[in-house]
Amino acid sequence: EDMRGVHSLGIKSLRLKNTPLTSTMGQGEARSMAIAQFPSLSYLNASLVSTNERKEAERRYVSMVTRLLQSTSLEPDEATRESNRQSLLAKHPQYDTLKDEHRDVIAAASNSTAGGASGSGGSTLSATVANLMVRSMAASSCSMEPLVRRLPGSLTVGRLKALCSRYFGLDTDLISLHYRTKADAFPIELDGDDNTLDYYGVSDGGEMLMNEVDLRSGRDSLNGKSDDGGDDIDTFESKVKEQERDLIARQELQRHMESGGR
């Protein structure tokens, strides 16, 4: 359907939960898509939308629509091509508003599409490449330097866990990963090994928190849940901050011991 009427409402706050519109998307991907398509949105799921988060969401959105538009050119019939193009633009009215601001993204997406078709079929945000830092919160490796890599959005969580396993020396089955940006209220759990980084809306400059699963409880210590089964933001933030304080304390103790206690 044409989305122009929805965007004209000037929605400031929005909560998405169990909606068919985002049922095929990861939590991060759904958030990114909503932010890009609603320019007046200030809060999404009770979390503030920062300027940097909006910019990143818009760039991913422009990249996605550009690739979808390019895919319509594969249709041999000219009338069908134009019909498909107009239908796509009607679904994504923000594209016309954002395309001039993000011309570099359009150029990059066009070059990528020319080099090969996307395997996603155009149904979700297009594959990207992101500079990421993976920081260990596990006791056995928290003093190690973070792992910094440039990773494709098509990389699966399972393969990222394998990379972390080799670097941090932790068994793959014991690894849990959470992703956050500077704007995130709390990290997003990467809970599906077969899902890609794009599925979770992973973007350039984000941070991965690697933790060790407690086999006795079957979950890691960053998973905070409220009584109704939803994420408890306050609990989640508190646990992340507590682990970060412990991490700093352990690192300081190790440096003190390595310096001979001086």
Image (cartoon, rainbow, N blue to C red):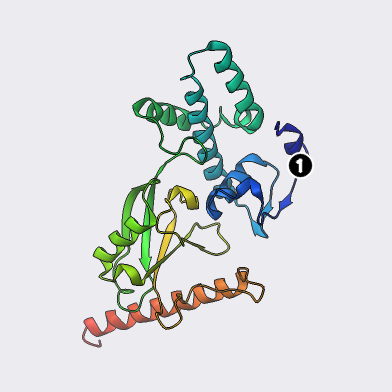
For label 1, the crowd category at 10 Å Cα-Cα, with few meaning under 14, some 14 to 19 and many 20 or more, is few
Image quarter hosting the C terminus: bottom left
Residue 256, quarter of picture: bottom left
Tell me if residue 125 comes above or below residue 131 in the rendering.
above
Q: Looking at this view, is 24 or 199 the one in front?
A: 24
Q: Is residue 93 visible?
A: no
> Is 252 left or right of 184, judged from the image as shown?
left
Residue drawn 33% across and 49% down?
Answer: 150
Tell me if residue 19 comes above or below residue 83 in the rendering.
below
> Is 104 left or right of 226, judged from the image as shown?
left
Q: In x, y percent, where is residue 141?
A: 30, 74
Q: Residue furthest top?
A: 78
Which secondary structure lies at badge 1?
Answer: loop
Q: In x, y percent, where is residue 112?
A: 38, 30
Q: Looking at this view, is 25 or 132 the one in front?
A: 25
Q: Residue furthest bottom?
A: 261
Q: Which residue is mark 1?
A: 10
Q: In x, y percent, where is residue 78?
A: 54, 11
Residue drawn 34% across and 69% down?
Answer: 173
Tell me if residue 182 comes above or below residue 153 in the rendering.
below
Residue drawn 38% across and 45% down?
Answer: 154
Q: How many marks?
A: 1
Image quarter hosting the N terminus: top right
Residue 220, quarter of picture: bottom left
> Is 96 left or right of 193, judged from the image as shown?
right
Q: Is residue 223 visible?
A: yes
Q: Residue furthest right?
A: 9
